[in-house]
Amino acid sequence: MVHRKLESTIIEMLESFRIVAINGPRQSGKTTLQKKIATNKNMKYYTFDDSDIYNTASSDPKGFIEYISKTENIAIDEVQMIPEIIPPIKMYVDERNRKGMFLLTGSSDMFKNSKIKESLAGRMVSFNLYPLSYSEINKRDINIIDKLFSDDFNTFDIDFESISKEEFISAVINGGYPEVYNLPIKAKKAWYDFYIKARITKDIANIENVQVDTLSHLSKLLKVLAGQVSSLVNYTSIAKSIGIADKTVAKYVKILEALYIIKLIPSYSNNVLKQVTKSPKVHFIDSGLASYLLNTSVESSMLGQNQHLGNLVETFVYTELIKHQSNANEDIEIYHFRDTAQKEVDFVLESSLGDVVAIEVKSSSTIKSEYFKGLLALTKTIGNKNFKGIVFYGGDKVLPYKIEDYQFWAIPLKVLI
């Protein structure tokens, strides 16, 4: 079993909050982690995937919560399946006011669930558990977010040359779902095919009232979005390719976000950055799922036959960033940057203190001065003294790169695996 770095944080939070929630995509390892913590904390475990428990809880949510919570703290899995359970939980924790009463998991973002009207603000803290990070898979003690914001951000205890290009490409194409990342190709495709069908048919109804034709549209939308991964979202273009209205596309995109399948990355802007593109970028939560939808493979990528590889590498970097973000000490937000002159930066990480780490992603093994144009434009515009400009690239060495009076760095992508 792969150790999840979020585990210690969840255990710590149960000592301070009445409710702790673990959200994330199905098959990301939430249930395994929840059961492990529940055993550690002597919590009784229930799952709404069990039809008997589901039927009992859905028929009388208040009575169910009152009964199971009488003598012990409770872990409830897949809580989004019964939105009506939230008000009784809220009432119960308000009455008892005890720390660590509930450990909940959900395969959709309960804050984006149109069927959940109650707020648990002040009672609950929530964390996202994504598919495995490669630091977890390879048992590396590093948090890339904290590392990039540290003073020694450009020093790594890693022999980059010992990691082959094929190993890195395999990480990008395979993604990090615990059940699938090391499966053979045929089994992997079967897993993804069932996963998509199960998510669309089973989970969407839990967060939104949808029509039958919606399921077909969402299936098409997923493939279109995979083709536009790491690009600006163009609702009009997507709507034309599927044959539905712009507003409907926007609604479906929100559903896919709530289900932790995709994520829209907002544009970076502030009072200084007035002339920037406002459109968000789209990324998949797992690069393996995007690779499956694009019918790519490690072999075709190694042979230079994968036209989407550069975009998939960028979305892979994003997936690793958000996985490390979940348990980082540094509190950050992630954006992208593009100005009206088309100068762009793939990721802008801004801390709560206003420090900025800007990252451009290039899969090439060589460095070119043009790779730093977006970083240069951004640092000149914002004038932030606490600014780091980094190009993640496909080489094997950490290299300094100076343009004008600005110092930038090239860091191997392999630091992420």
Image (tube, rainbow, N blue to C red):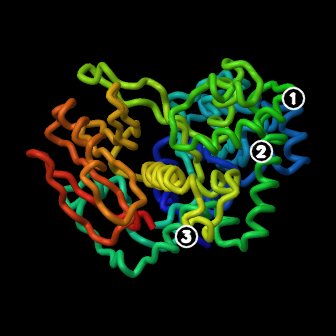
Specify the amino acid type for callout 3: Met
Q: Amino acid at mark 2?
A: Arg
Camera-side mark, 3 or 1? 3
The image quarter in which residue 229 lies: top right
Q: What residue would you read off at disc 1?
A: 213
Q: What's under tag 1, amino acid-wise?
A: Asp
Q: Quadrant of the C terminus?
A: bottom left
Q: CA distance from mark 3 to mark 1?
A: 38 Å
Residue under label 3, please give it.
Answer: 302
Taking depth in this image into account, of 313 and 204 the one nearest to the observer is: 313
Q: Which residue is disc 2 drawn over?
A: 199
- Left or right position of 370 against 305: left
Give the spatial CA distance, label 3 vs label 2.
Answer: 31 Å
Marking on residue 102: none
> Residue farthest to the left?
405
* Mark 3 or 2: the one toward you: 3
Q: Is 256 positioned to the left or the right of 279 in the image?
A: right
Residue 25 shows in the view: yes
